[in-house]
Image (cartoon, rainbow, N blue to C red):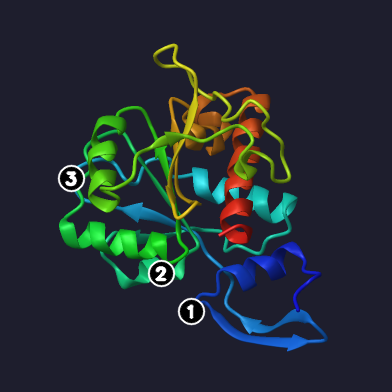
Amino acid sequence: MFQILTFLEKLIVSFTMRRLACITITCCFVTIATFAQLKIAKLKYNGGGDWYANKTALPNLISFCNKELGTHLEAEEDVVEVNSPALFDYAYIYMTGHGNVVFSMDEAANLRKYLIGGGFLHVDDNYGLDKFIRLELKKVFPEAELVDIPFTHPVYHQKFKFPGGLPKIHEHDSKPAQGLGIFYQGRLVVFYSYECDLGNGWEDQRIHNDPEEKRQQALRMGANLISYCFTAN
């Protein structure tokens, strides 16, 4: 029935949320009568880590996606807690920080339910998150492992092509950037950008003084993540 859809139409069909107020279907097309703009969110977690880091990152990514992908995302992200029912209002959840993170068992169960139900979590190590988040993700998916995402995966081949995988934005330990993931029933539900600092590349240029080429690489990869989670999940 839905054979020809614009990017925005696929976005809405693939992840219908409570934010939508009214959808009408006419002549095999999806038309939007009235709806609140879609939003993405940053994850607020416990444990003491700076979940609020990279304050200019998501607004800049949103602006880039609205321009380059034709999305209609709200200009500012929301903040959502791990155990909140509001988690299910968002197709894309961003998580970052430099320090400790702790999920209670209830929080882990809520996050798992969100992810297996069609949600998408992007964990962005801001240098210091790694040893904590790996333990907490085990609470969410005890049966699964973080694995290298092959360079042939669609997340690297949306509008912007990354045949060599995740771009390296900031240097810390002379390690390559890694795109790691957790798959559930064949679907990528967690994307973990490690040794990359992807979100730093989204921030205002004045904050890190990154070359524009690096910022564009980061924004394009971020746009691929947005595109993938709204259309492939």
Quadrant the C terminus occupies: bottom right
Tell which circle, 2 or 3, labels the residue nearer the N-terminal end: 3
User: Residue drawn 60% across and 68% down?
Assistant: 14
Can residue 49 be spotted in the picture? yes
- Measured as percent of width and height from the top left, residue 174 is found at 44, 11
Question: Is there CB contact under 8 Å for labels 2 and 1?
Answer: yes
Label placed on residue 80: none
Q: Which residue is mark 3?
A: 47
- Measured as percent of width and height from the top left, residue 38 is found at 56, 68
Q: Which residue is mark 2?
A: 88
Q: Taking 34 as reference, is 215 above or below it? A: above
Tell which circle, 1 or 3, labels the residue nearer the N-terminal end: 1
Tell which circle, 2 or 1, labels the residue nearer the N-terminal end: 1
Q: Secondary structure at mark 3?
A: loop
Q: Secondary structure at mark 1?
A: loop
Question: Is there CB contact under 8 Å for labels 1 and 3?
Answer: no
192 left or right of 70 in image: left
Q: Quadrant of residue 221?
A: top right
Q: Quadrant of residue 219?
A: top right
Q: Which residue is mark 1?
A: 18
Quadrant the N terminus occupies: bottom right
**Mark 3 neighbour density, 10 Å: few (under 14) some (14–19) many (20 or more):** few
User: Residue drawn 70% across and 88% down?
Assistant: 24
- Measured as percent of width and height from the top left, residue 206 is found at 54, 30
